[in-house]
Image (cartoon, rainbow, N blue to C red):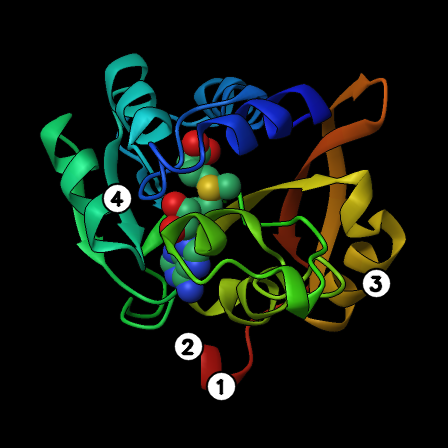
Amino acid sequence: MTNDSKRRLADRRGQETRVYQPAEDSALLADVVVDVVESGDRVLEVGTGSGWVAERLERETKASVYASDINPFACTAARDRGVTAVRANMLDPFARRSFDVVCFNPPYLPTDPDEEWDDWMEHALSGGPDGRRLIVPFLSNLRRVLAANGRGYLLISSFTGYEEVVSIAAEAGLQTEPVREESYPFETLFVLELTPTEMPTNDER
Ligand SMILES: C[S@@+](CC[C@H](N)C(=O)[O-])C[C@H]1O[C@@H](n2cnc3c(N)ncnc32)[C@H](O)[C@@H]1O
């Protein structure tokens, strides 16, 4: 999301308080993941919103694509596009080693608690005070759901704290590699590739 798109989103609030519509960040993530997914891969898009990214992955690869979102309206929107979507909190319901590729464009805008809106768009945009409210649980649980040789792809912004995210990923046993970067006047977006650094522990098997 760039400042322009944030402004547009702000302008649209009121009409569009339910489901995040695709923006620059969605396209950046989709462009990266489409290129790395191989036919036969099992792919999960966490926080699918409108389902646009998952639909692109399904259309442009021969992978089995699944999507999830905490927002029931997002799940309906994704299903309307033909995407298999389940309502879920982050990676909670998914079994160990389920996916070859997991991708996530999280809510990442640092948001003052006094400015929270308490609607579904808040779930789509707000990353809490430091922007990492959902990035932390995503990184902590990713290894569990990745199959052997599986990888994660996480969209982050310069607002989210690049070094902080890399360090949280390292603590969770994930190596980070920036695979795409796009700069806008007030913001840089990155897609990080996340690869488990060592053999899974007994708990993760
Ligand atoms: C920035 S939007 C991205 C939407 C879509 N993936 C895209 O790129 O256009 C973040 C999405 O994460 C979802 N989300 C927020 N909290 C979540 C949670 N705890 N578990 C799953 N999804 C969540 C939101 O409802 C929203 O659809």
- For mark 4, what is the residue? 74
Q: Alpha-carbon distance for marks 3 and 4?
A: 31 Å
Q: Secondary structure at mark 4?
A: helix
Choose mark 4 or mark 2, whichever is in front. 4
Q: Earlier in the sequence, mark 4 or mark 1?
A: 4
Q: Secondary structure at mark 1?
A: helix
Kind of residue indicated by mark 4:
Ala
Specify whether tag 4 is near ligand 1 (CB below 8 Å): yes
Tell me the quarter of the picture where residue 21 sits: top left
- For mark 2, what is the residue? 205
Q: Alpha-carbon distance for marks 4 and 1?
A: 35 Å
Circles 1 and 2: CB distance less than 8 Å? yes
- In percent of width and height, residue 183 lies at 81, 19
Which dot marks residue 202?
Answer: 1
Choose mark 1 or mark 3, whichever is in front. 3
Tell me the quarter of the picture where residue 44 sits: top left
Q: Earlier in the sequence, mark 3 or mark 4?
A: 4
